[in-house]
C-alpha cells in the first residue's frame, strides 16, 4: 500500500515509513501476519494528545479556570473528534486490517479510526519530535477547542428549563434530533424540545448536545 498520499493529507513526510505502517496496523491484521499492532503507539499518542491540547489551552485561553480547561479537553480529546480527523484525512483508505475486520466494515468504524489517529500522532512524535506532532494536533483540533471554549461557561439550559416547567407539577419533556446536515466530519444538528408532546422550540449546534441546549435556551426565552 502506497502511503505517500496519506503523508500529503496529514502534512508530514516520514523518514521511517515503517513507523507509519505500524501506526495504521490494527490488531486483527497484526494477528494474521505476525507483526506488531498499533496499540503501543496508540497508548503513547493518547498521552501526547492530552499534553499538547492542555498546553495549547493553557497558553491561549488565559481566562479559563482549571475545571473549565478540564471540561474543554474532555469535550475535544475524544473518539468523536479523532474520528472527524480520520475522516478528513481519509485514514480509512490506508488501514491494515484483518480479513474478517475488513469484511465487516472495520475501516469505517469510529473506534478503530480514532485509535489510528492517536497512533499516527505517536509515530510523528517518534519520527520527527514534538514540534511536528504538536503542529498536526493543533491544526486539526484548534477549531474544536475554540468551539468548546465558547460553551464551557454556559448555564445548563436543559436543567433550568426542567426546573421552570416542573414548578407547575409533573411534566414530560422530550428532546429529539429532527435534522442533520453537512459531511460526517462537520455536521450541524437541529433539535426540538417538546412539553407533553407540544413543540416549545428548536435549536441548532455542531453536536447533538449543543443543539438540544440551544433548543432549551430558546424555550426559556419564549417562556
Image (cartoon, grey):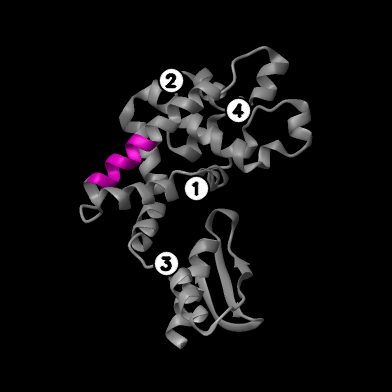
Circles 3 and 2, Cβ within 8 Å, touching? The answer is: no
Q: Earlier in the sequence, mark 1 or mark 3?
A: 1
CA distance separating discs 1 and 3: 22 Å
| Residue 19 horizontal/vertical position (percent) | 50, 20
- In this rendering, the answer to whether 210 lies above or below 86 is below
| Residue 177 horizontal/vertical position (percent) | 62, 68
Q: Which residue is mark 1?
A: 81
- Point out which mark residue 15 bears: 2
What's the magenta region?
50-58
- Point out which mark residue 98 bears: none
Would you say residue 148 sits in the magenta stretch? no
Q: Give the class, few, some or many, for how many residues have Cα within 10 Å of label 1's Cα (few <14, many ≥20).
A: some
Kindly state the secondary structure of the residue where label 1 is placed.
helix
CA distance separating discs 2 and 1: 27 Å
Kindly state the secondary structure of the residue where label 4 is placed.
loop
Q: Which residue is mark 3?
A: 156
- Point out which mark residue 2 bears: 4
- Rendered image quadrant of residue 93: top right
Of circles 1 and 4, the one toward us is: 1
Of circles 3 and 2, the one toward us is: 3
| Residue 82 horizontal/vertical position (percent) | 51, 43
Amino acid at each position: 500500500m502506497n502511503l505517500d498520499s496519506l503523508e500529503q493529507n496529514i502534512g508530514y513526510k516520514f523518514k521511517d515509513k515503517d513507523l507509519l505502517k505500524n501506526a495504521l496496523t490494527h490488531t486483527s491484521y497484526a494477528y494474521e501476519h505476525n507483526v506488531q499492532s498499533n496499540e503501543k503507539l496508540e497508548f503513547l499518542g493518547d498521552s501526547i494528545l492530552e499534553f499538547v491540547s492542555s498546553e495549547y489551552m493553557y497558553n491561549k485561553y488565559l481566562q479559563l479556570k482549571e475545571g473549565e480547561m478540564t471540561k474543554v479537553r474532555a469535550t475535544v480529546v475524544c473518539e468523536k473528534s479523532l474520528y472527524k480527523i480520520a475522516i478528513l484525512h481519509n485514514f480509512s483508505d490506508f488501514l491494515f486490517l484483518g480479513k474478517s475486520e475488513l469484511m465487516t466494515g472495520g475501516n469505517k468504524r469510529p473506534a478503530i479510526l480514532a485509535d489510528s489517529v492517536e497512533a499516527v500522532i505517536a509515530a510523528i512524535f517518534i519520527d520527527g519530535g514534538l514540534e511536528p506532532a504538536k503542529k498536526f494536533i493543533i491544526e486539526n483540533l484548534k477549531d474544536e477547542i475554540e468551539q468548546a471554549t465558547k460553551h464551557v461557561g454556559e448555564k445548563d439550559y436543559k436543567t433550568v428549563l426542567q426546573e421552570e416547567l416542573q414548578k407547575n407539577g409533573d411534566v414530560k419533556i422530550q428532546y429529539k434530533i429532527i435534522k442533520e446536515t453537512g459531511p460526517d466530519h462537520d455536521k450541524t444538528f437541529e433539535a426540538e424540545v417538546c412539553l407533553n408532546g407540544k413543540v416549545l422550540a428548536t435549536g441548532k449546534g455542531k453536536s447533538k448536545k449543543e443543539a438540544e441546549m440551544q433548543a432549551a435556551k430558546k424555550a426559556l426565552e419564549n417562556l
